[in-house]
């Protein structure tokens, strides 16, 4: 059985670049110390990656 969880929220266009960097974890410094960056290679995107900046 498949499951899906989704969260919908409105954002202004100026916030999208920062949200994309946050979601893709492209920054070197993370506020969450539990992030294991060695597992980043396991991430995948179902949509083509495009810059929003």
Image (tube, rainbow, N blue to C red):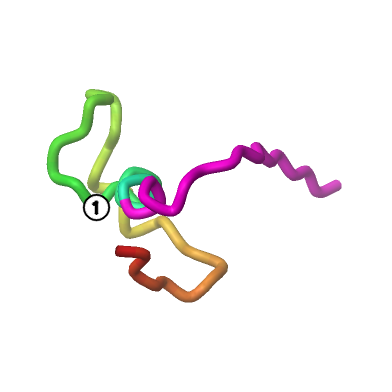
In the image, 8 versus 12, the foreground residue is 12
What residue is rendered at 56% in x and 67% in y? 46
Q: What x and y, as percent, mark residue 19?
A: 38, 46
Question: Which residue of the protein is positioned furthest toward the right in this rendering?
Answer: 1
Image-quadrant location for residue 29:
top left
Indicate the position of residue 39 as horizontal and vertical percent values: 32, 48
In magenta, the rendered stretch is 1-17
For disc 1, the neighbor class at 10 Å (few under 14, some 14 to 19, many from 20) is: few
Give the number of callouts: 1
Q: Is residue 13 above or below residue 53?
A: above
> Is residue 18 found left or right of 11 in the rendered image?
left
Name the residue: 65% across, 37% down. 7
- Residue that carries the numbered disc 1 in the rendered image: 26
Q: Residue at x 37, y 65 (%)?
A: 52
Relative height, residue 5 to residue 24 (above, below): above
In the image, taking residue 15 as reference, residue 8 lies left or right, namely right
């Amino acid at each position: 059985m498949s499951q899906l969880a989704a969260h919908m929220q409105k954002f202004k266009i100026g916030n999208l670049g920062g949200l994309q960097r946050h979601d893709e974890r492209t920054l070197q410094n993370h506020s969450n110390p539990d992030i294991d960056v060695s597992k980043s290679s396991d991430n995948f995107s179902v949509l083509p990656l495009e810059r929003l900046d």
